[in-house]
């Protein structure tokens, strides 16, 4: 049988002390009705740094579960009301509904020295709902200091159940259904207020006309999707703008997009999650369509997938760099620039830069500067100037400020500086 030993780091402090599970070995058969003790270790880190004003400063541990109830310890380093001067106070707090009676004691533990218990006997007490009980005069501060382990006070809680009444009510509350409800509207024809027809227009040369059969074939190549203006306005603003001209549910025709890729984008807009296989198989198409219609998060996800899966070479790097620049894929451009810096000797004289826009020079300079400082462990993006930050760090800062995270490095930096 195993007793419960839980190492709990107080949420207000850093660090921790490892704890090991106690294994209980029975010699003989336990008598009928024998109740095992549960042992829980609660670690208060940085005890010396705690304020200790009497009846004012208190520290509450994280919650732990024992006998199906939630508990925590409350420590007053300088004592509570009624505590003698120089003494610390501690109590066991019952944090849930229901009534439970148990024996318990609280003691300080130091490996090699054993456990010093704050009472000569175990305390029987009936906890009813939100309730606590403990020791007003738990231990002198001087004694506590002798029991610290690397500045950590280890309190061992011994608990044994006597009886339980009105066990805590365990309730199940499902998550907010709004996301699932929106996803249910995906391609829902009955509630839709927009119709989109997606497919190739089979364009003919100038001056040519289509016969009846070719028009019929073109019509059958179209895929029809039903959507909702309100959802598009928030998820794909440029697509919503395109649909403004539609009247009385007349179809909006889009002839430069693959229907299966459009379906993936629309599914994402309604809150759907694309599989890894769907993302990997359509990364460039997803970047193109999400960039065109303003589905920023999908564009960034597709860009991240493409960036992690692409194998850069001297032969393909220029095409990928120009593509990244055309689609404002700042992360992809950054990866290519890093490749150029790292492989400069292999690239020199083998690649023509005639078609490379001069605006990319600043990206290259940034990559060179980044290469010089990447081995400096003390130089993190959080401490850098904006123009030296990586793309992911810039996007994170923009997101934290509620700003648009799409666009080139220059656009992101300008946005941050304007809102500093």
Image (cartoon, rainbow, N blue to C red):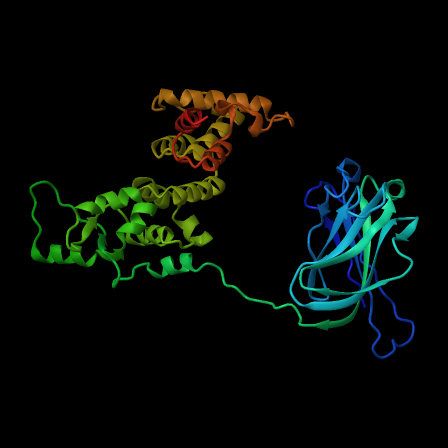
Q: Is residue 37 above or below residue 395?
A: below
Q: Position of residue 53 (x, y in %)?
A: 76, 38
Instruction: Tell me the residue at 69%/66% (across/down).
Output: 68
Q: Is residue 353 visible?
A: no
The residue lying toward the viewer, choosing from 237 and 340, is 237
Residue 302, image quadrant: top left
| Residue 264 located left or right of residue 348 | left
| Residue 389 located left or right of residue 231 | right
Instruction: Tell me the residue at 46%/52% (across/down).
Output: 276
| Residue 221 located left or right of residue 268 | left
| Residue 305 located left or right of residue 146 | left
Q: Position of residue 52 (x, y in %)?
A: 77, 38
Q: Which image quadrant: the N terminus? A: bottom right
The residue lying toward the viewer, choosing from 288 and 378, is 378
* Number of marks: 0
Q: Position of residue 203 (x, y in %)?
A: 16, 46
Q: Is residue 133 visible?
A: yes
Q: Position of residue 181 (x, y in %)?
A: 38, 60
Q: What residue occupies the far bottom of the structure in this picture?
A: 32
Residue 95, image quadrant: bottom right
Instruction: Tell me the residue at 87%/78% (across/down).
Output: 31
The residue lying toward the viewer, choosing from 191 and 137, is 137
The residue lying toward the viewer, choosing from 155 and 296, is 155
């Amino acid at each position: 049988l195993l007793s419960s030993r839980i190492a709990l780091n107080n949420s207000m402090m850093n660090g921790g002390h490892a704890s090991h599970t106690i294994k209980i070995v029975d010699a003989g058969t336990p008598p009928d009705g024998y109740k095992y003790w549960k042992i829980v270790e609660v670690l208060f880190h940085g005890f010396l740094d705690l304020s200790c004003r009497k009846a004012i400063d208190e520290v509450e541990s994280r919650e732990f579960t024992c006998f199906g109830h939630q508990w925590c310890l409350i420590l007053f380093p300088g004592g509570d009301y009624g505590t003698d001067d120089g003494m610390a106070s501690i109590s066991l707090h019952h944090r849930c509904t229901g009534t439970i009676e148990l024996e318990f004691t609280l003691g300080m533990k130091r490996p090699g020295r054993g456990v010093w218990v704050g009472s000569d006997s175990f305390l029987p007490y009936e906890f009813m709902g939100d309730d606590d009980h403990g020791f007003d005069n738990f231990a002198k501060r001087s004694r506590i200091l002798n029991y610290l382990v690397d500045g950590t006070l280890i309190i061992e809680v011994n608990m044994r159940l006597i009886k339980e009444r009105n066990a805590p009510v365990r309730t199940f509350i499902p998550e907010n259904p709004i996301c699932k409800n929106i996803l249910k509207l995906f391609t829902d024809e009955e509630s839709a207020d927009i119709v989109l027809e997606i497919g190739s227009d089979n364009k003919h040369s100038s001056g040519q006309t289509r016969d009846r059969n070719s028009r019929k074939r073109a019509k059958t190549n179209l895929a029809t999707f039903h959507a909702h203006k309100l959802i598009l306005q928030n998820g794909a603003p440029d697509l919503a703008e395109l649909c403004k001209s539609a009247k009385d549910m007349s179809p909006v025709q889009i002839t430069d997009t693959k229907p299966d890729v459009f379906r993936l984008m629309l599914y994402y807009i309604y809150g759907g999650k694309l599989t890894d296989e769907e993302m990997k198989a359509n990364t460039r198409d997803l970047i193109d369509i999400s960039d065109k219609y303003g589905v920023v998060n999908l564009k960034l996800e597709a860009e991240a997938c493409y960036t992690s899966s692409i194998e850069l070479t001297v032969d393909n790097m220029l095409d990928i760099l120009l593509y990244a620049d055309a689609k404002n894929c700042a992360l992809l451009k950054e990866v290519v620039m890093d490749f150029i810096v790292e492989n400069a000797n292999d690239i020199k004289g083998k690649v023509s830069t005639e078609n490379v826009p001069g605006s990319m020079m600043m990206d290259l300079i940034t990559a060179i500067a980044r290469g010089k400082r990447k081995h400096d462990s003390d130089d993190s993006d959080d401490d850098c100037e904006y123009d030296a930050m990586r793309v992911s760090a810039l996007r994170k800062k923009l997101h934290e400020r509620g700003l648009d995270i799409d666009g080139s490095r220059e656009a992101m930096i300008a946005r941050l500086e304007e809102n500093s």
